[in-house]
Amino acid sequence: MAVLGVSSVTPAFPTIVRALGVSSGQVELLITVFTLPGIVMTPVLSVLSDRYGRKKILAPALILFGLAAAGLALLAFFLVLAFVR
């Protein structure tokens, strides 16, 4: 999923640079803040899904991911964008 997520947001980088007035180095930070939670949370969510069932863990996680992604369209500040991402 991380590869798919990074591939889907990369074409938007030039637009993000122009719209938010940030450097290309700053916008590359979005890749890091996108993949880092996946690295940290995968072992935790794996244990929880084994204990409580995959559907009970996956459904809320996907809903949270979808809401955060939808909220990205409304943000106008880079630091908030990076935090939500």
Image (cartoon, rainbow, N blue to C red):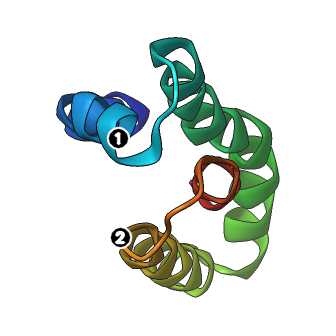
Using the image as rendered, state which of residue 40 and residue 76 is in the foreground: 76
Which residue is painted at 70% across and 54% down in the image?
A: 83
Q: How many marks?
A: 2
Using the image as rendered, state which of residue 21 and residue 40 is in the foreground: 21
Which residue is painted at 34% across and 47% down in the image?
A: 19
Residue 39 percent coordinates (x, y) = 69, 33
Q: Residues within 10 Å of mark 2 (few under 14, many from 20)?
A: few
Q: Is residue 18 above or below residue 51?
A: above
Q: Circle 2 is placed at which residue position?
A: 73
Residue 4 visible from this viewpoint: no
Residue type, label 1: Ile
Q: Is residue 31 left or right of residue 70?
A: right
Residue 54 percent coordinates (x, y) = 55, 73
Q: Disc number at residue 52?
A: none
- Image quarter for residue 77? bottom right
- Image quarter for residue 20? top left
Q: Circle 1 is placed at which residue position?
A: 16
